[in-house]
Amino acid sequence: MIKRLILASAGAGKSELISKEALERAADGEHILILTYTESNQKELFKKICRLNGYKPTEIVIKGWFTFLLEDMIRPYQRCIFSNRIPGINFNKAGDPNKRGGRNIPGTAEKIDGKYNSIHYLTKASGKAHTSYLSKLSYRIYKESKKNNIGRLSGIYDAVFIDEVQDLVGWDFDIIEAISKIDDLAFTCVGDFRQTVYTTHPTTKTPKTNTEKRERFESIGFATKPLNVSWRCIQPICDFAHLVHADENLYPKTISNVTQVPDVFANHTGVFTVSEQHISSYIQLFEPVILRLDKGTRLDLCEDQKCYNFGVSKGLGFERVLIIPTENHRKFLRGETGIFDDAKTDAPQNTLYVISTRAHYSVAFLFDEDSAIDVVRTWQP
Amino acid sequence: MTIKKLRLLNFKKFQDQTFEFNNDINIVVGDNESGKSSLLEAIEVVLNGCYRGKPLRSELTTELFNNDCIKAYLFGNKSQETLPEILVEAYLEGGPNLKGDNNSKKQDTEGLFVRIFFDPELADAYASFIENPDSVSTLPVEMYTFEWFSFAWNRVNQHNKGINCLFVDASRLHPTYGRTQYINGIISAALEKNDRTTLNLNYRQLKAKFDEEDAVVAINDNLDTANEITQKSLKVTADIASTTSWESGLQLAVDDVSFNQIGKGEQNQIQIKLALQNKAQDMDVIMVEEPENHLSHINLVQLISSIEKKNQGKQIFLTTHSSYVLNKLSIDKLCLLAGSYTRFKELDAKTVKTLKRFPGHDTLRVILAQKVILVEGPSDELVLKKIYLDKYKCLPEENGIDIIVVRGIGFKNYLNIAKPIKHPVRIVKDNDGDYQKNITEWLEKYEDDTFSIFSPEDNSSYSLEPALIESNSDNVMKLDKLAAIMLSSQTYNKYNTGDLQAKNEFVKDWFKGEKTGGRKVDSAMRIFENNEEITFPDYLLEAVNFDD
């Protein structure tokens, strides 16, 4: 069956695409599983389906990635590794539970004397599964149970979608590969690697980076298809955001599908720099939503304004946005578009892409200089 | 979805037993107290999380536990790990998300299980309970809890289990069983899903209207005019809490008579037919206890034919004591509970068909009796009973020996039915004047069967009456005595001429030929009631000899 990787750009209507196809399939009596990492996206997909169809047909199941791993990949055949029922998951907020200060905690090895060590995977007190090792355990059960968990899955569903697939890393991809081996399953992964801001778990296992993930999809046999439109941002904003990853030469330019700008916003559209001198009048005039690094950033400006930290702005959309840039962002505005090339992770680069693609009509940076980037204009009152 | 298999551990009658089922109809048969109802109750426990229609949570009592496991616990050291557990496992087909290998047979298959076990959180309470182990006289079920999982080891609830069963049991119409809830469950199952909502909505609107009726408003205005009872407004209103639905306020009426007031037979039929109707198609399993209850034969015939027609796509379990129900619905669907569990699915197709056509035969007697003697006619039955009574001073049925007249469908069909149960079967058969052909050669067809045949080898004793006559023909006196019993006084006068030979031939001829059935039965009756001593043929004496 076809395995598709859909590379969407921000605002491309991923949820809509998944929802529509899932509904069509459900109408044909197929059973569909939609997986996504975050709870907010599960809700988003649910809402989208309800908006399109009035209700969510029972044939469509939306599950969180961790819930899926526990309920479908682990528990049904977990006795090949652990004989006591795993009652739930333990969300590892603080990262890898088996590491302290970058070192492995003694006694947490995966196997001791050739036997699986429950401490590696489960909490000592209640036997809940560490989220950091959930996909690894799933893969072990896949192997130990002779693929029974994947066989079971193929008996339930005709189509599987993974949304926001960029959030998945390391062992998660071994599960993707296992699912991809089901013959009569339509398997679609949708994501935008430029928007990777968090991952399901910390890992040293590949794939970790966007490039590694895309290569892995290719080697599994996924056909890649771009979805390079934006229903959210006007063309100049798309053009600016495109520059963030332009050096990688992987993504086609995003085409804006926003054809009409409402009159109230038409007076100010595009990407701008605004100097300190004019900033308060700019805020007063356009009432942009302020995007900032964290809640300690520029309290003087942010007080009484609608503000979001960079990290939580993903998935959201606003008419106008004002970004309080970091040092890296300033360098980028000065024309150093390769600034992220040497970064240890993709995160800072992806963050800039995410915050640049929140606004429908205008993006402004608090920046005293004129930007070296063509599409960015300097705002004057 | 269908149940393929059920495993019960420590549940009521069953210490550890596995039952396999048919996908369509399962006719559960067994003696009283053999566990027929328990089997159906176990299915309700594991598919609905209910025991006799009530949530299992509130029904955890010692009644659920096997007596032997309770005894073993009470006679043991009573340490925590000796507390018995109940396991009810349903192996299913048609629910892929219930699949996994978390079952006692470690099979990778679909299924659900309920486990009733001591709640380890209550170990402290248990410690004080067994402080003086000798004073412990009962299982501490109050400290028990239960879990309900799929074989995927995910928790199941009423909404995600994907399989439903409906238990039609007339005794639940009794008020103590929560009659309203029970009958409404059945009505609800019979309706379309949308119909349920519409009923509920209209019922709530009706109740709201009640409060707005002028007369009701007037009564309420006068209730506490001076606010002497409370400073707030006091009213009599219809109970329209959203939790109370039509189910508690509406009921079924038959010809404008409340369902609870109509005849029991009618109640029984309507319940079963409603349950089978199941318009919403949301019932997978329908269980019926003794559909023959309170029904006349004609009504039973109608009911069974409607069960036959309306069962499509549903798995039916019914218990019965009626051979008619069993034969008509197909005897190969029989699930016999008699110590062990036996299914009849391999039964000879011809026999199944014959019994569907002639459902009046007492097949259940063959199946349930401990020892069976098959005979050709009612005279054989009576005479055998007489011999048994003389010998053992009681009737054979009192000792679990059932003498059955095979009538039209012949020995073959009865032997086929008896085959799966491996009961000792005795056959008393006439040689019809040719022992070689009718007995020896006849037997050759049944070489792998385990039954014993009793027939006179002497061809002149070609059936019961001649055999009786032959064994009393030593002298005239003896034959006269027999003839006096077997013949009416009028016939005896005709008989009472000539010598022994002539008399012998007269009696034999009297019972010979067609249309002598009435004579034979009359004479058998007289033999049965007679107190004179007569000599019975050896083959009959042996047929009822259970001395070992």
Image: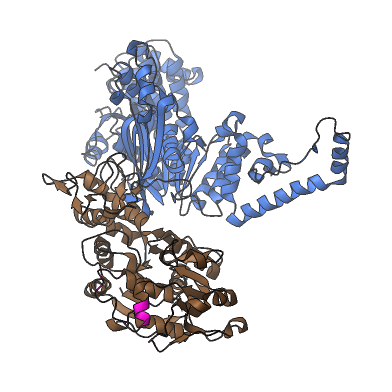
Judge whether B116 appears above or below B525 on screen. below
Magenta stretch bounds: A330-346
Q: Is residue B26 magenta?
A: no
Image hue for chain B: blue
Relative to A116, B345 lies left or right: right
Q: Is residue A336 magenta?
A: yes
x, y percentage for residue B420?
A: 30, 38
x, y percentage for residue A60?
A: 44, 63
Instruction: State the residue at coordinates (28%, 43%).
Output: A123
Relative to A3, A279 lies left or right: right
x, y percentage for residue B151?
A: 33, 47
Q: How is the image coloured?
A: by chain
> In the figure, residue B239 lies in which quadrant?
top right
In depth, the one of B7 and B155 nearer the eye is B155
Judge whether B279 appears above or below A228 on screen. above
Judge whether A199 appears above or below A74 on screen. below
| Predominant SS of the magenta segment | loop
Q: Quadrant of the C terminus of chain A?
A: bottom right
> In the figure, residue B44 lies in which quadrant?
top left
Image hue for chain A: brown
